[in-house]
Structure formats: structure tokens, C-alpha cells
Image (tube, grey):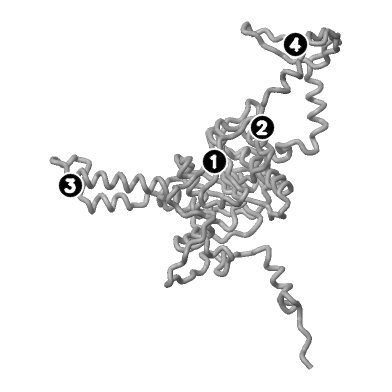
Amino acid sequence: MGKSSKDKRDAYYRLAKEQGWRARSAFKLLQLDEEFDLFANVTRVVDLCAAPGSWSQVLSRVLIKGEKFGRTAWEDREAKFRQQMLGVFGSTQPPFVSSASEIKSEADKLRPRENVKIVAVDLQPISPLPGIITLRADITHPATVPLLLKALDPNYDEKTKSQQAAHPVDLVISDGAPDVTGLHDLDIYVQSQLLFAALNLALCVLKPGGKFVAKIFRGKNVDVLYAQLKIFFEQVHVAKPRSSRASSVEAFIVCLNFQPPKGFSPSLEKPLGVGFRLNKMTEQNTRSLPITAPMVMQNQATGTWESITHFVQVTDECGITKVEPEDHRQHAEIDIRWIAPFIACGDLSAFDSDASYRLPPDHVPLDPVQPPTAPPYKRALELRRAHGGAYGKTSPKV
């Protein structure tokens, strides 16, 4: 987030620098917390794809420093105002109400949480943040799991080769996205693979009842992704923060109450998804089908006799499982898709991220809170300077 960005008219861009955030994406996490109360009873967090560190900065200020933003700050102000009104208009001052100055100092007092552990992971270097453990690693590589488990638990022994955390975390967040190409189908596919990589890592460190938040790109087949996440989480929501531009296809998947299936063992060596295991999984599925003799039944509509080759297992009220022929004509009309609820986050009185607001006459542009440490365009700028600028070196005038 530089000083001469093309988004300088964006209200959240300016507001992020005024409030000391590293990037405007910090407001996305704050608005998600307003809707889902993500930070409630949370002390151990893993931030994936964390660079430049705006989401980790939010975690540091909320969990470690004890600051309050959004809904919790509003609730504190309302509670303080009600107590002041009780002290002013009450005939007898309740025992729990102190003077106005004492109430204000108590409300403004920071309440840091105990035993907070926050680990940020990214391929790009992250400038240090107070209380944040940073790892420069690839979330798609199996070697990242031991590094993350070691950061969460200093007593972790790599010789055990365990890929499950002894002290699981309460929340896993991921704001990662690939470099978009403009081809929406390709961008959506690459983003879904990045989401699966974050999910595979989250399954290794997340405790039962934990939460998972990640960025997604909405597409025509994104409901399949929702159904896959529904296997591991009790509630799955799709949220669009107000600070996220409506013109963007990005949204955030919010998964609550982690409940792994019985017997499930997470591992990055055998990640979720089909990939190269498609043939093996298809063969295992075929072996699990019931072995039955060929069956011929009469079609009631045409009167002809047809061979039935597909069967389904049906369990009646007595608990007896029967194998019956499957009527594809009946099942073809049933829509078995599961669509996650879509929620718009953020106060309606907040700034509109797609609008351009007029700058005051005395507006002074601020420097970025944290300049880019290793931007991917750095090499391109060096090559451009070496060739004399955008148009190359000009020939000397004669």
C-alpha cells in the first residue's frame, strides 16, 4: 500500500493509513468479526498467507494488546453510557456504579488475553509484529507442518513424525490469493487449490469446535466447495465485507464449529482433493458396491422389460438394509446441491469501497505504515531502470 497507489481515492485505503493498519484488508477481518464474533474465546491463532501482515496486526492489537474494535467497542461504549445515565438520573446510586471518571478509565483500559499464541506463515517475508511468530514457508509443502507444530509447541519432537498438534489452535485464517490472470475460470480454479492447501494445513492444527476463515473466488461451481467444507464444519457461511469491492469476485468462507469425521487423520502427504488419486478412489468405490445378479423389471409406462444394473441401499424403520434398483428418472429431477448462506458484513453507515469520496482541501497524503519488504515487482523495476525507463534508452541527439 504505497503513497501513489491508484486506489488513493478509496476511503478504506486512506483510513487504513490514518489508523495505522498495514493494508486496507484489515477492515475485512474486523467486519467479519463484527458479524460472526470470530475472536470470542480465542487465544491461539494461525494466520496463513499473512504478508504484508494486516490480519496478524489485527490479531496482535485485539488479542495481545487487548484493544477493541467494531461491535465490541460499540457495546462497551453503550454499556458505559448506560452506567453514566444510571449515576446521573438514578435516585439511589447502585453499588456497581462508580463516578464518571472511574467508569471512563475502566472502559478505556486495555484487557490483553492470557497465553496468546499467534503464528503467521507466508512465502514472502513479513516485517516483525509484537508477539507474532513469523514463518517463511510454503503452505502446500508437507515440510511446513513440522515447522508450524514446532512454532505452536516448542516441545514438539519431529522424530515422532506426527502431523497433528498436541495443543490445537482456536482459529485459522487465510487471506491468500494467487496473481490473477484475468481468465476467471483459471483464477477461480487456482484460488480453490490455494484454499484446499490452507484447509489441509488447518485440519492438522485446528481443535474441535474451532473456526476457519479463508478467501474464495465465487464461480458457477463454488457450491461444490461449500458442500466439501460442510463435511468438517457444522456451519458454513459465505460473507462479503463492506470493505471488499462489489466489483470483485472475492468473498470469504466462514466455517464454524470444526467437527472432523470419525476416524479422519489429517496429513499433507495425502491432502484432500482427488488429483492423482482419482483412479484409486474410483476403484475403491466400485469394490464397495453390492454384488447382485442381473435383474430385469417391466417398465410400467411402456410395458417393455428393461435390465436394471444400478442399485441403492435403503434402510427401513426397523433398521434393516435392503438393496433396491435405482430409478434414474426419479433422481434426475432432484436437486442435491447445497448452497451456503450469503451474508453481507459491515455497518451500512460505513464507507462504500466502490465509491470515490471527495478529498478535503487540506488533505495531506500519508506515507504507508509498512513499506513493501520484498514486492514481486521489485525485479521488474530494476530491469526497467537498467534499460533506461519504460521506453528504453534513447539515442543521443546529434
Q: Nearer the viewer, mark 1 or mark 4?
A: 4
Where residue 88 is drawn, which disc sits there?
3
User: Between 294 and 183, which is closer to the camera in this rendering?
Assistant: 183
Q: How many marks?
A: 4
User: Between 330 and 347, which is closer to the camera in this rendering?
Assistant: 330
Between the C-alphas of marks 3 and 4, the distance is 75 Å
Q: Quadrant of residue 173?
A: top right
Specify the amino acid type for callout 1: Val
Mark 4 or mark 2: whose residue is earlier in sequence: 2
What kind of element bears circle 1? strand
Q: Nearer the viewer, mark 3 or mark 1?
A: 3
Q: Is residue 69 visible?
A: yes
| Image position of 213 (left or right of 320) | left
Above or below, 168 relative to 50: above
- The residue furthest left is 91
Mark 2 or mark 3: whose residue is earlier in sequence: 3
What kind of element bears circle 2? loop
Q: Quadrant of residue 71?
A: top left
| Image position of 24 (left or right of 181) | left
Residue carrying label 4? 323
Residue carrying label 1? 169
Q: Nearer the viewer, mark 4 or mark 2?
A: 4
| Image position of 326 (left or right of 235) | right
Q: Nearer the viewer, mark 2 or mark 3?
A: 3
Between the C-alphas of marks 2 and 3, the distance is 60 Å
Residue 289 in the image: state x and y as whole percent: 79, 18
Mark 1 or mark 4: whose residue is earlier in sequence: 1
Tell me the crowding category of disc 4: few under 14, some 14 to 19, or many 20 or more residues within 10 angstroms, Cα based: few
Residue 39 in the image: state x and y as whole percent: 47, 43
Q: Are marks 2 and 1 in contact (CB under 8 Å)?
A: no
Residue carrying label 2? 265
What kind of element bears circle 3? helix
